[in-house]
Image: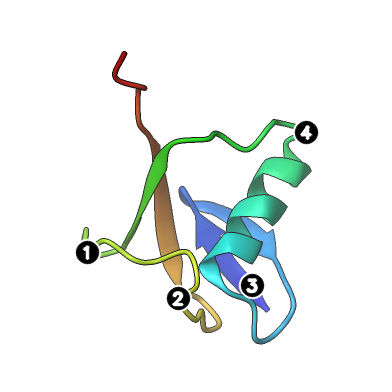
């Protein structure tokens, strides 16, 4: 199944959750998954990491700075 993370195509298995898409996105880029982040859909609605995805969904990951 193909979805878009930060406007980049990511290929994941059917039935994948938002967290699976994030891991695949960062793995494709050989980057470490950030500890603090927010995830939104194409309409800027916040979505949970255990949210379901469908073919063609668009999600956006925004890194949050730690408040220390």
Residue at left offset 64%, top offset 72%: 2
Q: Nearer the viewer, residue 8 or 35?
A: 35
Mark toward the start of the polypeptide (1 vs 3): 3
Q: Estimate how packed mark 2 is, as few (under 14), some (14 to 19) or many (20 or more) residues with alpha carbons within 10 Å.
A: few
| Disc number lying in front (2 or 4) | 2
**Closer to the eye: label 1 or 2:** 2
Give the spatial CA distance, label 3 vs label 2. Answer: 16 Å
Alpha-carbon distance for marks 4 and 3?
A: 19 Å
**Residue drawn at (31%, 13%) of the image:** 68
Residue 14, quarter of the rendered image: bottom right
* Label 1 crowd (10 A; few <14 / some 14-19 / many >=20): few
Residue under the image location 55 percent in, 82 percent down: 55
User: Which residue occupies the extreme top position in the image?
Assistant: 68
The picture places residue 27, in percent across and down from the top left corner, at 76, 44
What whole-number distance in Å separates the C-alpha atoms at marks 1 and 3?
20 Å
- Residue 2's tag is 3
């Amino acid at each position: 199944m193909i979805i878009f993370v930060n406007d980049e195509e990511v290929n994941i298995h059917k039935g994948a959750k938002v967290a699976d898409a994030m891991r695949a996105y960062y793995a494709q880029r050989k980057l470490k998954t950030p500890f603090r982040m927010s995830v939104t859909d194409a309409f800027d609605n916040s979505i949970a990491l255990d949210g379901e995805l469908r073919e063609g969904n668009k999600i956006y990951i925004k890194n949050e700075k730690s408040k220390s």
